[in-house]
Image: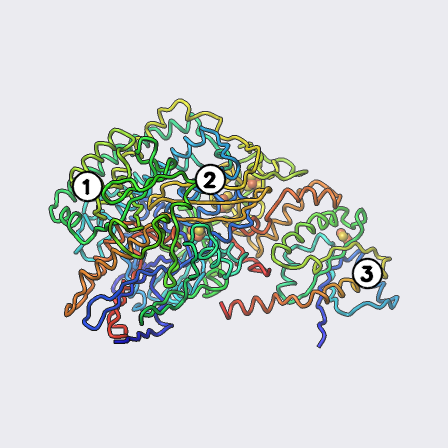
Amino acid sequence: MARTITIDPITRLEGHGKVEIFLDDRGAVQDCFFQIPELRGFERFVVGRPIEELPRIVTRICGVCPASHHMASAKAVDGCFGNQVAPLAHKLRDMYYHAHYIHSHIAHFYALAAPDFVLGPDADPAVRNILGVVAKVGLEIGGKVIRARALAQEIQQILGGRFTHLVWCLPGGVSKGLTAGELEQIKPMVAELASFTTFSLQLFRDVVLGNPGYVDLILHGPYTLDVHNMGLVDADNAPNFYDGQVRVVDYEGREICRYEAKDYAQHVAEHVEPWTYLKFPYLKQRGWKGFKEGPDSSLYCATPLSRLNVADRMATPRAQEAFEEMYATLGGHPCKALLACHWARLVEMVQNAEMLERYCADPEITGTQYRVIPDRVTGEGVGIVEAMRGTLTHHYTCDANAICTSANLIVGTTNNNAPIQMVTKKVAQALIQPGKEPDNGILNMVEMAFRAFDPCYSCATHYLPGQMPLTVAIHKNGSLWRELRR
Amino acid sequence: MATNKLQVAIYWGAACGGCDVAVLDTNEFILDLAAAADIRFWPIAVDGKYSDVEAMADGELDLALFNGAVRNSENEHVAKLLRKKSKVLVALGSCAHMGGIPGLANLATKEEILLTAYLANPSVEPGNQTIPQARTAIDGMTLEIPYFFKRVFRLADVVDVDYFLPGCPPAPVQIRNVLLAVVKGELPPRGSVVGASDRALCDDCPRTKSEKKLKAFHRPYEIVQDPTRCLLEQGILCMGPATRSGCGVRCPNSNQGCRGCYGPLPGVTDQGAKFLSALASIIDSKDPKEIDEILAGLPDFIGLAYRFGLPASTLQRSYR
Amino acid sequence: MSFEPKIVGFLCNWCSYTGADLAGTSRIQYPPNINIIRVMCSARVEPDFVLRALAGGADGVLICGCHPGDCHYSEGNYKAMRRYPLLKTLLKEYGVDNDRVRLEWVSASEGQRFADIVTDMTERVRALGPLRLKTDLQTDRVER
Ligand code: SF4
Ligand code: SF4
Ligand code: SF4
Ligand code: FES
């Protein structure tokens, strides 16, 4: 039966994230769309700007992970100058980036994910937030969390001169080094953060693992997908956030490909759909095959869990222990349970803190050779880092006068766009069945799915992570039947 | 609602989220704020109930902080909604204040932006001909996304704004001070810039300054900047003379030039034009040919002088 | 209907305004398209004055000051001289043709020179056609 669906064009434009669900005659889910309503156009408007300015422009793609864009951009710009970079600068940038990771992971885990775990998914939405968490776990722990995030920000401030929207990286290095006095200031902060990461793992054990219901939800809920994994690794196949090679493994652990930043365009392509501003990356050599799971799928996730799934080990000892514990509990490596992303984040944070400790003990770190002046413009560069929310690629070209002539960006969350579509549909199908009235429960379910990815539409377009205003519209028999919002 | 607590909402348009992080960066103050105010709506940290905002009475909110520029029909819609529901509407951050970095898009056309993102870039699916549409019909299903405006607007272009709190992002201590002023009812006259100084950034910059006289400009990739001397005197561009202070001299303290995110000085409407005058006055030459040579070392003046405020400038966009 | 350019002229009080006056009293013919604003010195012409004139509907802007070395305030016109190329660069980046804005030195005795400049500029701007920034700014808002 032919069906026409009309929606009043003017009234449907509000709400940020928008899910459209279409039901067939029987009332079963026919299709489901997660739409991203925005685009800001950075790829176009950086053209014409001096290439060395890009690292301080692209930070504004995302204020939650500005350092990811800054670093990826800096590396792409270095490429435009023949990759002449002071070795010390790479160390300093990596050090900064670990502190940045800790800030972002704390914000995500405690402010966005913890409310579900600590207060329970059924808690009153009015208290299901960070303030509610503080009320439940006590001001002491709340204060500890706030302080830990502030310390991570402070370390960045000392190292790079500012935290949000840093302006530190320049072709060939960084604009300022780390003095011995600054290092002494940082050391106790790092020690405190290191113990905070241990504390966070313990909290997770107590609160989440101590509750069999949650473990069951993680492992057996509808939150699994048979798609592949992407992440950056070092030569030993341990996760590296600032540098390394991109590795893609399938959901059973077999390597699909491994590539250098400069070869990204042979391996990843982006599909466009007319109904969303956000593109859908896929593995180019497999071709776009639609929103399909399974061994032949061309889709992949790039999440904290994916990063650990593509890794064989962690780079540091305490993180390695946490890694082994996690996979032992989850039933082996790799793991498909999307909700385990939250745990993976804490494991990563342990490595971040240990790496900071390592840099603090590095006698070279306070050196003064943090910058070289490049002697030629070579005109093209690709920079890849692991943003907290997925593999981030910046690819630039410039002319002989070092003016940007093109820019291509594949940002963290975008990688996960197709998996998010799919898991949303899965949840909708699990919840909406013929003859069953959908209620606000669907919102929580959908939300928990995408919160595992920590999708940052700030990055992808601009939306904030976590609790974005969400509209779920359900259409039946050609017209809008139910609309759920928050 | 029987409460005399301050009713607050924080929301965004075309933004990066950095302004919200800056609010979080007030750290412990967040807890004080939560005690003094009902945060009715703040998607990054508090469970947002969008429908609640629509259900509010007009003027029910005491304060709304809006960050981000106005890029599409949805941003405009939300801006108008919050204007209606709030007694005091604050443009938070450079994007809401002046268009911000997203405002650089006004140097390109809407068509160029869409073509680049969806057709031209090297990682786009080979053979792709699709560009997102405001309205799409698939198998009888119709899907809509907001309409992408032909250019970027600042908040004050679409609604009346009571206060402007500049910065990209605003310094957390400034946000804190403004919120305290709201709580105490100590706000200056409507239309004011708040959370910033009336001095120029140079006045607060700790670098050593002498007479500014320039024979050449240098691109930052060409030289190592001396961390103690005025950058402009070294021939490194810095917008300090044409920028309001208040950020804590963040960029010069990172050994980099200012790009003007705190906006123009009091009484100045066009920050870029003001910067132009400031630069002209330090060029050390009276010979037109030499002046041209000196200026040749300075590419993309528009992208520099209006890094954070093209939509707020006198001409607002490119006319190419 | 043929297009009549609107040109705003910022003339320094001490030389150029007097020069323009001389053109008038000497009955030298020049196009009526220029609207003259007297300023104390060419240095008084803030770059934003020019931008505002264009945004307000002008098709061209002429700035006139004393010859180098003759500025009543000794250095004012050098300031104008240094601003001008930067302003032209900026306007070009905005997509405004450089022939629409011009800086010239006109002394009190150069009535003929003033008339020639205005004639030449009017013809150049006429050839370029209307600028329409004012209309564009207004329609942008309506069409979004
Ligand atoms: S002003 Fe800066 S920090 Fe705030 S939303 Fe805009 S880009 Fe982000
Ligand atoms: S121009 Fe920049 S570096 Fe120089 S004093 Fe002003 S703010 Fe400081
Ligand atoms: S130095 Fe300038 S660009 Fe940097 S934060 Fe301060 S006002 Fe903004
Ligand atoms: S007084 Fe004529 S240019 Fe200065």
Quarter of the image for the N terminus of chain A: give it: bottom left
**Could you tell me which residue is drawn at 26 percent across and 34 percent down?**
A312
Going by the numbered disc 3, the residue's amino acid type is: Phe
Identify the element where label 1 is drawn: helix
- The answer to whether residue B187 is visible is no
Q: Is residue A73 left or right of residue A143?
A: right
**Could you tell me which residue is drawn at 48 percent across and 47 percent down?**
A57
Crowd class of label 2 (few under 14; some 14 to 19; many from 20; radius 10 Å): many
Going by the numbered disc 2, the residue's amino acid type is: Ala
**Towards the viewer: A285 or B306:** A285
**Towards the viewer: B29 or A381:** A381
Q: Which residue is mark 3?
A: C114
Crowd class of label 3 (few under 14; some 14 to 19; many from 20; radius 10 Å): many
Which chain letter matches label 1?
Answer: A
Q: Is residue C90 left or right of residue A420?
A: right
Identify the element where label 2 is drawn: helix
The span from disc 1 to disc 3 (Cα, nearest Å) is: 82 Å
